[in-house]
Image (spheres, grey):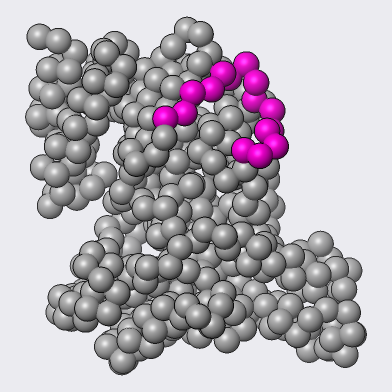
Amino acid sequence: MNLTEKWLEKLNTPGTEAHLTKLYGAANLQAQKERYATLLKTFEETFEGTDGVRLFSAPGRTEIGGNHTDHNRGRVLAASINLDALCAAAPRKDGIVRFHSEGYAPIEMDLSDTDVHAGEEGTTASLIRGVADGMKRAGYRIGGFDACVTSTVAGGSGLSSSAALEVMLTAVFDGLYNRFDMPFTERAQISRRAENLYFGKPSGLLDQMASAAGGLVTVDFEDEKNPKVEALQYDFAKKGYALVVVATGGSHANLTDHYAAIPKEMREVAACLGQEVLRGISETDLMTNLPKLRKQVSDRAILRAFHFVAENDRVPAQVAALKEDRMGDFLHLIRESGRSSYMYLQNIYATNEDQSLSLALCLAERLLAGSGAWRIHGGGFAGTTLNFVPRERTDHFVKLMEEAFGKDACRVLNIRPVGADQLELG
């Protein structure tokens, strides 16, 4: 029996089936076994063997509360989901990385050079180099590897495909060259550094932390180097609600300047008030200093600051509502969050020509009024909306949304209880 046959046998063992069920849900077990088997076959065909191969995955994330608060040291409520970046990888002895990702051109690079490369921004190569450098700086061993990757976290979907890839890469280095025991907070920090410094996107830490931690979590970034993470237990499905993201067809490409403007403008307001970030500034501070602020920053910056202050206070209220099982209050807070993002944060559309997110929110309000919740999902400007849909209305909701935005525009999400994951033959 060759190694591929051994892997296929392992995928059918009760232990592995239980493992995959935990990651993806029982309804998706067979499809995931086939997906894993296909990836292993692709690896064997690409690299002519499977010696030492292991399987690594990291999930996408859903942002539930705390829209654009993380980069000003705010609070968030987020969860990892059952969509992920999945990698078959085997170590090499020469420090070379050969990286084949489904749908993209192959990458080959030498890890003897992990410096930032001008012109490499926005590429997968920059993330590989950035994660490798971060691992090395943190005292972990790194080395070359062969890898084949497939992902169900579509780029531009608002479910954080880049964070899933980054966290997956920390898992690859950790599993192949270390003990696979890296703290999830360290995975997130290394991944965020790669995205900021190498990929060139000025994101906060929410995406990477949610992917690395796994499950439903609330995170307080007041001390950004040591964020406080609290795991929560709440089963939305058992309460009769499905989490549905609606992809409206817009792409996050070419929107970096729009994203960058939000933390920049928030920090401009903070600077006017003698602070580095908005955390710790109150609505009273903003109201009292309005004349001064209007002379020094734009009105949009002030509106975004008002959003931050209220949104940062909404997160612990959302957490309390879940802990106390007050679903109605929780849904009200989600709707308030969405309203604030639309009116004050202003991250629903980048140009007047594309208002697909606005339309998705309009339709959701009409379909769910009085029984659910809807809001922008993630960074905004393009991508997806997040909707809490009563189970009995889910089929109707999905049908109408896909009539508007196309087949497979909707994803019904499950919360994945595990962050970075490793599966090996032993």
Q: Nearer the viewer, residue 285 or 249?
A: 249
Q: Relative to residue 61, is residue 261 drawn left or right?
A: right
As rendered, which of 201 and 6 lies closer to the eye? 201
Is residue 109 found left or right of 369 in the rendered image? right
Q: Image quadrant of residue 35?
A: top left
Numbered disc total: 0
Q: Position of residue 421 (x, y in %)?
A: 35, 35
Q: Residue at x 69, y 67 (%)?
A: 261
The answer to whether residue 7 is above or below residue 322 is: above
* Residue beneath the point at 88% across and 90% down: 291
Is 315 one of the magenta-colored residues?
no
Residue 101 in picture, x, y percent from top left: 37, 35
Task: Please state, as top left, top right, bottom left or bottom right, where the C terminus lies in the image.
Answer: top left
Vertical side of 5 occupied by 72: above or below = below
**Closer to the camera in the image, 212 or 60:** 60
Whether 112 is among the magenta residues is yes
Question: Residue 266 placed where, x, y %?
Answer: 73, 70
Residue 85 to residue 201: above or below: above
State the extent of the magenta-drawn residues as a range.
106-120
In-image side of 190 versus 413 (left or right): right
Residue in view at x 74 percent, y 78 percent: 301
